[in-house]
Image (cartoon, rainbow, N blue to C red):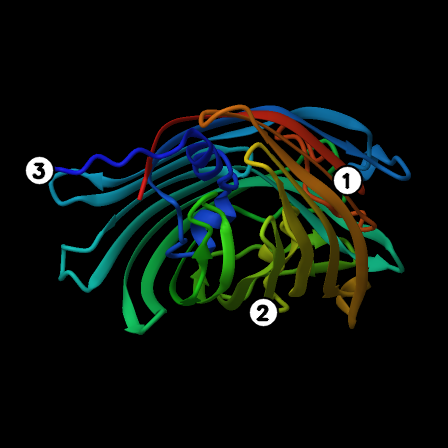
Amino acid sequence: MRRIVTIPFSVVVGTVAAVPAQSLFDLTEKRNPVLPYRSLFEIEAGAIGAFASTQDTAVGLEDTISWDGHVYYRNEDFGERRGTVVGYAGRDGLYAGLFDGQIIGDQTVSRLEIKVRPWQFYRDGFYRGDAFVPNGLYEGRDYEGYLGFGREAAPGLFVELGGYYRDHRFSSSAQTTPSFVVPNDYASYGARVYLEQSTTQLDRRRGTPRDGGVVSIVAEQEWNDSSAAFGSPGFMTKLPSQVWRARAVAEYFVPAADDAVWEVLLRGGWSDKKDRVQNFEAQRPLGHQWADGSLRLRMHFGDYFVLTPFVQGQWSKVVGPGGSGTTSDFFFGGGAESYLHFNESISLHAWYSFLDNESRPSVKVSEDAHGEHMAYFGMVVRFGGQRR
């Protein structure tokens, strides 16, 4: 006779509604996230604002408010083969992924991914003290297809190797100076390897990370067919025919009390200094070497309210004026994030952050608009959350 288990309502609220929102970064840089659910459909929508310490619309520093949000879907029992399908759409891009462990053997996971970033901004420039000095600003979009195969090489260590093809398109914007030459459109292809070590443990009551952590390292070698020089009159260059990149993300969770957890979140990258397009993507710290880290204290007040204050630091190293030498700087800031869960389906999500870096992500898709202060307020609605 089947035993029927009843789960208290407060546990369901804590488990489903406390799951952090997904992003394009989470879906592409981490291979096997530890999640509390097998299937979920989530919609988030709200308003995001940027507020500049000193306004300068010529370089995008301004006070402005725009929309933000995403749609996220995950199903780990897709089709007769019981594969995993994932879909995402947000301001940072579009993503579709299909993972299957039965195509070439149960121990090997095949992964097909399609990624589109239609609203990309590029800030080619350098730092003079804390001030960002642009060579030229422009915008673009890219489309990528990836096929990879991975398996567990040792307990907790996942290795994946794959290939990708990406198409790049660039255009001038209202902030592009007449003297700046925008890169020509080009295609690229390359090989990518992932190494991921995970020991993350979830709080069974709330479904959020409570102990352990994850370290994911990505390295890639890329070839492209770009041929024309681009840049400002005093600094014109061509992309090399091949470039290399390495990125890493590390997350650690340490219990502080029954209702509090320390979170250490680290990101970083190192790439070819001549990779002038990718090094100036505006949604992350600029440069061929960069690091971004935060120390957070996630505090649960009952099953319905979560408050996470944090401090943040960034480091960015870029090519200097005219291509000579390098410039670098440290940036510091902090803020807080909160969730208010009404039930297992509806939550309010809000956050505020400050960082004394003039080059922060744009809050708009129509133009590059940003500021040192950023704030967000929105609602999250979830459907069909199936717990593991």
Query: What amino acid type is highlighted by mark number 3?
Result: Met
Distance, label 3 to label 1, CA atoms, is: 74 Å
Residue 177 marker: 1
Sooner in the amino-acid sequence: mark 2 or mark 1: 1
Would you say 330 lies left or right of 259 here?
A: right
Mark 3 touching mark 1, by CB under 8 A? Answer: no
Sooner in the amino-acid sequence: mark 3 or mark 2: 3
Residue 1 marker: 3
The residue depicted at 45 percent of the width and 44 percent of the height is: 205
- Label 1 crowd (10 A; few <14 / some 14-19 / many >=20): some
Residue position marked by numbered label 2 in the rendering: 272
- The residue mark sitting in front, 3 or 1, is 3
- The residue mark sitting in front, 2 or 1, is 2
Distance, label 2 to label 1, CA atoms, is: 26 Å
Where is residue 79 shown, x and y percent of the image?
16, 38
Q: Callout 2: helix, strand or loop?
A: loop
Q: Callout 3: helix, strand or loop?
A: loop
Would you say 333 lies left or right of 75 here?
A: right
